[in-house]
Image (cartoon, coloured by chain):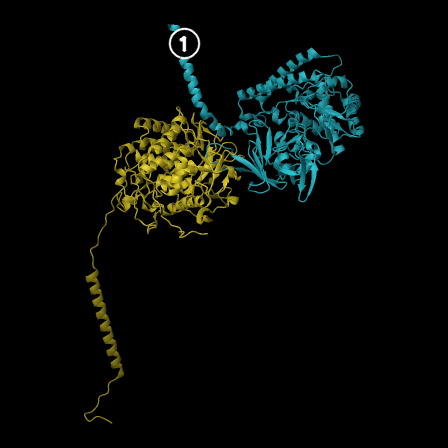
Amino acid sequence: MKSAVGSSKRAPIVGVLMFCLVVVCITGASYAVGVSARRVFLAQEDEVIPIIAGGALDEIPALMRGNLPSVTSSMAVEQRRREKPPRMCDMPADYFDQQSRGENAPHGYDKHNAYVRKYRSRRGFLNERDMRAAQVAWHYFEQFTQESTGLANSVGNYPSTTLWDTASYMAGLVSAYELCLIEKPEFDRRITQLLTTIKGLDLFRKELPNKVYHTKTGAKVDYTNKPGEIGFSALDIGRFLVWMRIYKNRYPYLANTIDSVLLKWDFRNVIDDEGLMFGAYVDKETDETVYAQEGRLGYEEYAAKGFALWGFRPRLAHRAEPFLTASIFGIQVPYDGRDPRIFHSQNYVVTESYLQDGLELGFDLPHDDSSPEWVHTDGWRAEFADRIYQVQENRWRQTGFMTARSEHNVKGPPYFTYDTIFSDGYPWNTVTPRGDYVPDHSAVAAKAALGLWALWETEYTDVLYEAMIELYDPENGMYEGLYERGQGRVGIFTANNNGIILTALLHKVQGTILTPYTGDTEVWYTAFRDQDIRLLRHYPDPPQKDDWLPALRHSVQEKADF
Amino acid sequence: MRHTMQALFFSLAVSIGAASFVAVQPARGQDRSAEAFASENAILDTAIPFAIGAREARQALRGAFGWPSFQEGLVQGVYFRFDPDGYARFAPTPRLDVDVFEVICRPRTYACAARKDGLEVFLTERGQLQMRLEHALAGDMFFVSEGVSEIQVPERILQPLDVQLELLLGAGGELSTRRGSTEVGRVSLKGFSAVTAYLRWIAARQDYAVLPRGWPVPNAESAGGMTQPAAWNSPMPQPQVVAPGYGTPMATGIAPATSAAPLTYSAQVPQTTMVQSNTIPPVQVQPVTIQPVLSPYSAGAPDVLDAETLRRELATLKDLFVEAQDADAMRARPSALFSQQDAEPIGQPSQAEVKKLFEAMERLQAQVSQFQPNATGSYASLSNSTQPVPLGNLGRDTERTDSSPPVQGQSSARMAYLVQHLGFDAQTARAILQAVPDNRIIPSQASAIPGLSTLTEIAATPSNVLYENAMVDQILAELETEMAAAGTVEHQGVALPGQASVEEYQLLSRYFVSAALPALLSRTGAGHVLQP
């Protein structure tokens, strides 16, 4: 049907054209609106950020890196830096009343992988018995320090020592001064002579100090105390570096002397690029230097932190891996996973290395100078140390054997034993350096017992204290320990034992021995910038935040594993 | 007044000195453990393997002293580890924790003893094994048991052991001690043979020659020719020549020990070892008397000592030697061949046996004089000459040989006699001829005999141990001169017509030791050793 008014017929092309036109118009309008809006809303003024010399954006040349301050936790997170506590005789009577102990802090890891231990350290003034023990222990060093060199004998009047034992002497010296057993003139005389001697030591093949030195002459010797050279020990040097840092931070007037000692040493072979530590020994056949990885779980991390305190980056050495655990009296005791049958190096688990970390470094990371005393920023070290303590208490509770195990000298063959919690696949393994099982030489080590007493305030450590605190010879110092099988005292006197006991007593008074560095730049970081010596000897730059050792955690044992 | 003050001052100084001395005394004992590692106490080189498969390892030392190395291995079913001072442990488990033989040596000596559960084993001064049982009393009975079977062993196991008993105890099992029907002690013998071999190895300054037959000794390539036939006992019965490196223990009174013949090690007392055989006349061996060397490294590595130290050690050695010489001379004067001190309660030969032995010695002497026309010593004169040979004469035969005129015809004839008639091989014959002072052969003439030129070269080569250092040469020359002078004076004083000279005595000794004794031992197989 058709309309009356008529009809008009339009071509389809027109419709298509009209549609396209509308689409184009709408799109163009949208684009124009968008661009305009973008211009309006996002338009900002071009800002030129100037790079300030020495500032964060400045790619600072090597020549100037020494001027940078070492970045510590107090600088990075703007926390209040810890302070060096006063000497015991300068402490007010209510000194410990003012100290917070974090009693209410829950134990375990926090979100930064720091760890709060279940037990607190023992703090307070020394009582009469403590003071008597401190005096006797210090008497060892009075008796056996050589006038000619200022070095102290490692064992009694046998005139030889290592850097490990020299560090123990330095520990004893600091403790004697801070506990007011000696005054500053005596302290200064001793430390100055010691540092002068150490600076003049003939190094092992112009690298690092030899493993052993004759204390009367300062000459490098072999294990029989005859002139010769053995090699160097990364662990000994690591411990020595811990105590050099403690001295430098506590007594800034010694800083230049301390730096000049270390600036003679060549660190190119002791730490590799991955942060693994190497000791050196001489090949018997070829007389060439052989560098071999040194350190097992416990000692390795402690020594690594000594290097890190001086700006080195022992990342791999500081890690617990590879480690395994052995279940002993319900505790998963960590031990080094490197098989002694393959690596020909025993994986001792002893108390000593954990004690030294706790007493001297507070189970903290090297860059930490601000965390509270009860927070341990090197969390897994504190947690492992708790296990080491607990398994020894458990043994005492379940067998009756008072237990505080460490390495110690013994009278007669084999003369030295590693009295371990675990080694070579066996718990409570007492072995000689060559691996013989010698259970008759198992003992309660005095240094381990008093170290546990200082760091764990418990009923068990009270028992240890009672057993050890009067175990001394007034003429020669504290005895090495008490035989477990009833043979009496271990009748040996050593620098290490007396040094650690003094450290434990000082820890009771002052807490963590390492105090923050209060200066800015250090000669250690600025020296030789105009030469290639720093490069050749692998002297580090001041550590920045990226250089910090990582805070790690490992799985926690929630309940006893039987 | 002045004198009084001086006296007061003097007494004060003395009291202060005494007080300080007393004050230091308590501390002296404590560092003994450190002094135990003085280099003088090192009597063993841990780089020399005790048995095949043993390895030297570094000790994990944390302290300032200790032995830097030790050796560990497995031999005859027991694991072992030993330190340079001789301290060792032998046990059937690698942990060395149960059933352990522990060997401890007296500092700076080769006197060592092995202990296990009340059993102590050590070498006598003559090199024989002796046992000591802590709880044993006279009248106790001893049994060696293995499982359910057991045999009774005589009470004389507590006296120096003979070969049979040593072999029996070394076979393993357990040694039980019974008093009536009650067992008062039982100790495992596991590791006994390995420990006894170790004790002998120490006493012989790590010479493989003293180890039992069948002992797994490292091969020549790795051990520097230690398994060459001349240097260690071959299972084949053949006469042997004293080899370089073997002469030192021989000179110090240590004879090779085999499983069949305990070594004859003499530290101070001269000894007499009798060897009997059905086919060969018995011979008497008189090892020279030398004090134990205090420092083993003084000979092995002379360069590590300075001249003064070496001179002092040699002077000490000389003094000790002279003392021993005097003592021996005193003992020898009663003209008793078997002195009272040498007498042992068991195995003492009867008069008839002694007479028989004397006759045999005369026959042997006659044989020797057949190729030694100038020798005038008889057995009687020989028996009077029991003084030890001066140290300076040791090892000098080679030098004397080279500087003497040749007697080629005699030498060839004697060589032919020794090889063809007596059945010695060329090496042994050569050694015998070398030991004869009047039979000089120069190297050029020696080449006429097959196989002799090489031997002559070896003989002409100076000993590496004794003469490699000019300073040592000089000192030894001085010492030899002194000793020779002293010896001449002494012998002039006691010389009798027809009595054998020192050189002749040495000639026979060397001949018997180097040729006759091994031959006898090898031919008899079990080599009877009689107690004098």
Give the residue pinned by disc 1.
B7
Q: Position of residue A182 (x, y in %)?
A: 32, 28
Residue type at mark 1 is Ala
A21 vs B449, left or right, is: left
Q: Position of residue A379 (x, y in %)?
A: 36, 47
Quadrant including the N terminus of chain B: top left
Asked where in the image residue B435 lies, by quadrant, the reply is top right
Secondary structure state at the residue bearing disc 1: helix
- Answer whether residue B318 is visible to the viewer in this image: yes
Neighbourhood count class around disc 1 (C-alpha, 10 Å): few under 14, some 14–19, many 20 upward:
few
The colour one sees for chain A in the rendered image is: yellow
Q: Position of residue A20 (x, y in %)?
A: 25, 76
Viewer-side residue, A56 vs B341: B341
Viewer-side residue, B388 vs A522: B388
Asked where in the image residue B134 lies, by quadrant, the reply is top right
The colour one sees for chain B in the rendered image is: cyan
Quadrant including the C terminus of chain B: top right
- Answer whether residue A307 is visible to the viewer in this image: no
Say which residue appears at 75% left-offset and 20% top-offset.
Answer: B407
Q: Check the residue under mark 1 and report the chain it is in.
A: B
Viewer-side residue, B279 vs A107: A107
Q: Position of residue A116 (x, y in %)?
A: 34, 47
